[in-house]
Amino acid sequence: MISLFSYYQKCFRQADFTYPWHEAVFYYLFSGKFDPEKGRMLKENTLSLDLRESSDYVLFFQRFLTLSCLSFLTQTPFSLEPLFQKALTHPYWQGSSLCSLSFQLCAHLGAWHQREEAMPSLEQDKIWSGGELTLQEEAESALLKGCLGLLKEDSELQERALLQAEWMLSLLDHEHFPFFSLFCAEESCAPLSLFAANHVLFCLCDSLTKEEKWHLASIRQLHHLEKCGTPAPSDLPLILPLLLALLKRLDPGLSFCVESSFLASPFIFSRQRQASGFALTLLGKNSGLGAFHKKGVKIVNCGPWAAPLGECRNFGIRRLAFREKELFFSLKSDLMQGAGSPKDFASPLESASSSLEGWTRLQPTPSFVDGWIHLKAREDKERLNLDLTLSSSPDAGVLFFAFLVQAKEAQVGRHRFLPATMRHYLGESALITFFAQEEKIEIALSKKGEIELIPLGGGRHFWGANFLLALAFSSSRPSLSCSIC
């Protein structure tokens, strides 16, 4: 098994560099040194960014943190005062938790936190963003908290990072593969970045707790990353190997160990079994309701989809929770409650049968400006049952419930289909089966109705799926029920 450093080195060796950002990180990975000239060019490019634009201020703090880590790790004096002052005088970014955490970490790495300037306060009462961040961003948020906690010797901040990491751990399947489509729009889907961010986060937790589960999870993330080949460096977060090096520098060793305790929020309904795993949620932003994984075959995403099929801006749900109480509005769950657990949390699932029920809003489209869908999900041994009901009856051909699937082959009744081909199915429903290796996933509808199976090309589009299965809603069919096993 290669290390994250050697994986990044392998990717960098095959790349042509045109950006100072890449060149500065490349130089450190191969020499362990900081090139001040490359740093100067990167600083100038970073200062030119407009902090009134959200895309620019995110990039600003990614580069600022890169330079801060490089200077700190190599003990190379390098003035970042202009970046610090620009951040203080253009506070548009302070609503972003990731930018705030990055700024705090930069300030501690550069010893600016000792100054009298008013530093933005950290919001420490939230473990989860309420669906606003993707899973990769959630992992990076926990990682930044952990690094900051180590620098400040702040055990409370380290514990917050551990709680957030426990939440990320609960969103891995039976093979430690992330349910990467949750809370993730198609354009933001970046499994490679999530593997790498999870790896570094779980290394942090291994350092803090010395628990075997974190070491295993971190190794499995590297395994999934290595199976993806060698992408271009632009497909990977450049800050992650630097944060990993920072963790090794700050490793508390056995002198400080934190006990982690898992508190799973009931807005997520997940299960990891010996040969399968699934996760469902009612919260997200242009993202799906959940995923169901087996070895080699995966429902990578599922959710409502307003016509036309294939337009990913029309897919999924949009419901966020900016305040903790909103997580539980119109939400029912019979997930078992552990003794001593807070009222708003449930302990890890141990029951043989569990369920999640509630309303969530459809992704707004011209066809559905304010549509809602009710989900009732029930687990019965190895089977997952879904009941879906719309708040209003749509016209035929306007709204679907779609499954996006990674598989080698699909079958509807006695008809078989292959990915990346023109042959598709449109007609009466029958048992739908997806195959890969020796595994299969079956989807069975409780009532007859129109379905469509469309082969896809896989790759970067449609969350990596190579089949799209669409179940049609209509005025005579405003609800659907199906089982997955």
Image (cartoon, helix red, strand yellow):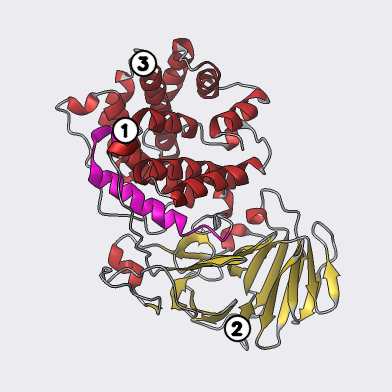
In the picture, the disc for residue 70 is none
In the image, the segment drawn in magenta is 150-174
Query: Amino acid type of disc 3?
Result: Gln
Provide the residue designation for mark 1.
105
Q: Toward which corner of the image does residue 143 lie, by quadrant?
A: top left
Horizontal placement of 435 versus 349: left or right?
A: right
* Numbered disc 2: secondary structure: strand
Quadrant of image for the C terminus: bottom right
Proximity of marks 1 and 3: CB atoms separated by less than 8 Å: no
Report crowding for label 3: few under 14, some 14 to 19, many 20 or more residues within 10 A (C-alpha): few
Provide the residue designation for mark 2.
481
Query: Amino acid type of disc 1?
Result: Leu
Q: Toward which corner of the image does residue 405 lie, by quadrant?
A: bottom right
- Horizontal and vertical percent position of residue 324: 29, 63
Provide the residue designation for mark 3.
75
- Horizontal and vertical percent position of residue 394: 58, 80
